[in-house]
């Protein structure tokens, strides 16, 4: 995803380059909402260690861990 957003930033330097936003938005939506994260969580939800890990960890952006509740 980072690569797609990087390419978009590069093409902003040409006329009509802003139309390149379609690619990064599409790939980000697919990974975050449909194919990447949801599919992984669906397959891992029966693993108690993963469930505990998911409670403490940010889904997409690397943020500091949350305190376990």
Image (cartoon, rainbow, N blue to C red):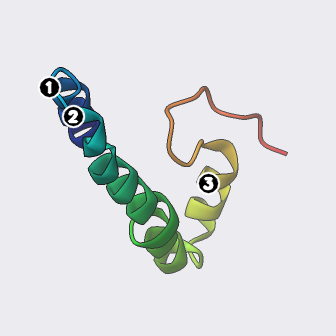
- Residue 58 position by quadrant: top right
Above or below, comparing residue 66 to residue 23 in the picture:
above
Q: Where is residue 66 in the image (x, y as percent from the top left)?
A: 72, 34
Location of mark 3 (residue): 54
User: Mark 1 or 3 closer to N-term?
Assistant: 1
Identify the residue at the far top of this view.
13
Q: How far apart are marks 1 and 3 (CA)?
A: 41 Å
Location of mark 1 (residue): 14
Asked whether, in this view, residue 27 is left or right of residue 67, the answer is: left
Please state, as top left, top right, bottom left or bottom right, where the N terminus lies in the image: top left
Pointer 1 and pointer 2: residues touching (CB < 8 Å)?
yes
Which residue is more in the foreground, 27 or 54? 27
Q: How far apart are marks 3 and 2 (CA)?
A: 38 Å
Asked whether, in this view, residue 22 is left or right of residue 4, the answer is: right
Tell me which residue sits at (45%, 75%) in the image. Answer: 39
Tell me which residue sits at (52%, 69%) in the image. Answer: 41
Location of mark 2 (residue): 17
Instruction: Please tell me whether mark 3 or mark 2 is closer to you in this view.
Output: 2
- Counting the numbered discs, the total is 3
Q: Tag 1's secondary structure?
A: loop
Tell me which residue sits at (62%, 54%) in the image. Answer: 54
Q: Tag 2's secondary structure?
A: helix
- Residue 56 position by quadrant: top right
Asked whether, in this view, residue 56 is left or right of residue 33, the answer is: right
Please state, as top left, top right, bottom left or bottom right, where the C terminus lies in the image: top right
Which residue is more in the foreground, 16 or 7? 16
Above or below, comparing residue 15 to residue 59 in the picture:
above
Q: Tag 3's secondary structure?
A: helix
Q: Position of residue 19 (x, y in %)?
A: 28, 43
Q: How crowded is mark 3: few (under 14 residues within 10 Å), some or many (20 or more)?
A: some
Tell me which residue sits at (17%, 25%) in the image. Answer: 10
Q: How crowded is mark 1: few (under 14 residues within 10 Å), some or many (20 or more)?
A: few
């Amino acid at each position: 995803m980072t690569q797609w957003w990087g390419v978009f930033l590069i093409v902003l330097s040409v006329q009509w380059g802003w139309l390149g936003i379609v690619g990064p938005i599409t790939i980000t939506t697919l990974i975050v909402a449909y194919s990447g994260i949801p599919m992984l969580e669906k397959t891992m939800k029966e693993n108690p260690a993963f469930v505990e890990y998911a409670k403490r960890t940010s889904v997409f952006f690397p943020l500091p861990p949350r305190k376990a509740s």
